[in-house]
């Protein structure tokens, strides 16, 4: 299963940190790449620096046309939105059977055709909260926790501790 | 089970949005309150406005002494950190049996005594990502999805749709 995340509505001034969190979550929770609809190289730089030391093959991409990006995607398209069907009522096993999944996360205002272009509109609850949270819970349910045990084969890694910090150079 | 979230290391200039996301996630995913170690009334204002229309009894509090706040807490204290034990290896049922849980989320630099003051140091994976993501996945696992079906009894509510948006005034 390959998961790509598409982040819509990135605002250069306002969203740098939230978009960086979305990219880091995508990487850490099992996605292969994230695509932004605005070319913000600051995010690419900071996330690439993380990958450089912590490992993995995560990719940051940009698109000039997110509509084409959705339309041309060969696979199932999942839009995360508080207006959609509760994730508790979604057959995740059916999604897991698909080879390629695009997860679309928006900002405040998502153009209405995104709802139509997507195969699923899924709500991580119907309360306002956070696109970072929605993406995290969705990926954790999709991968059933396996994503948290992946070996990223980086130049450093954490050795889990009951208390304190231990980082090993590899 | 009552869950309180304690957010450490809030920086007034830099963290407004991330801290707001942490508060909204706490509210939407079943916590009773969030406590900040810096008095940022902008966050309280925006989250209280959400509660006013979307419902619930979520509370935003501030503390002058987060150490006392942890020490004086009657219940189990869970610190979310990438250096801790993988959440996949934690007996969540044992946690769920406790009446009161404090979830501690930090920023970049968490004072080292937090590891000692906490009963559990839990990692939502050992890769760098996002405190919003860590909190979300932890709460979703703790409440096993039930948190996403809570009725907030607000003045408006979403009627889940396969496509498009439907909001009802109550």
Image (tube, coloured by chain):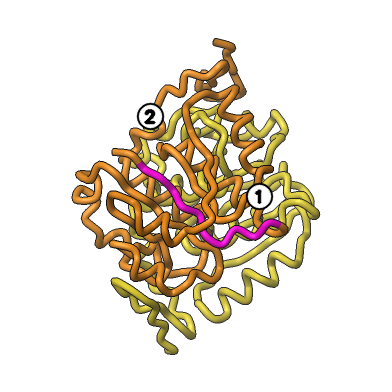
Chain colours: A orange, B yellow
Left or right of B158 in this view: A34? right
Residue A105 visible from this viewpoint: yes
> Residue at label 2?
B89
Q: Which quadrant of the structure image shows residue B47? A: bottom right
**Residue positioned 43% across, 79% down in the render:** B153
Within-10-Å neighbours for mark 1: few <14, some 14–19, many 20+? some
Is residue B11 shown left or right of residue A70? right
Residue B102 seen in render: no
* Vertical comparison of A10 with B48: above or below: above
What residue is drawn where x is 39% and y is 57%? A70
Quadrant of the frame with the N terminus of chain A: top left
Q: Which residue is denoted by mark 1 in the rendering?
A: A17
| Tag 2 secondary structure | helix
State how far apart marks 2 and 1 are (Cα): 30 Å
Q: Quadrant of residue B131?
A: top right
Relative depth, front residue between A41 and B102: A41
* Figure check: A138 above or below A48: below
Q: Chain of mark 1?
A: A
**Dot 1: what SS?**
helix
Q: Is residue B85 covered in magenta?
A: no
Depth check, front residue: B18 or A72:
A72
- Marks 2 and 1 in Cβ contact (< 8 Å): no
Write the start and end of the magenta stretch as one range: A3-12
Q: Nearer the viewer, mark 2 or mark 1?
A: 1
Same chain? Circles 2 and 1: no
Residue B126 screen position, x and y as percent:
50, 29
Q: Nearer the viewer, residue A57 or B137?
A: A57
Q: Is residue A156 above or below residue A59?
A: above
């Amino acid at each position: 299963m390959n998961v790509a995340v598409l982040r819509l509505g990135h605002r250069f001034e306002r969203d740098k940190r939230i978009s960086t969190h979305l990219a880091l979550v995508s990487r850490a929770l099992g996605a292969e790449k994230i695509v932004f609809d605005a070319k913000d190289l600051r995010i690419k730089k900071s996330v690439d620096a993380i990958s450089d030391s912590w490992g993995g093959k995560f990719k940051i991409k940009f698109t000039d046309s997110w509509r084409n990006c959705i339309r041309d995607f060969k696979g199932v398209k999942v839009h995360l939105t508080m207006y959609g069907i509760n994730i508790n009522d979604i057959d995740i096993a059916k999604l897991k059977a698909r080879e390629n999944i695009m997860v679309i996360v928006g900002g405040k205002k998502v153009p209405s055709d995104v709802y139509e272009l997507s195969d699923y509109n899924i709500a991580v609850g119907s309360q306002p909260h956070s696109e970072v949270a929605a993406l995290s819970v969705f990926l954790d349910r999709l991968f059933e926790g396996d994503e948290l045990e992946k070996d990223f084969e980086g130049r450093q890694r954490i050795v889990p501790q009951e208390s304190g910090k231990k980082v090993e150079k590899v």
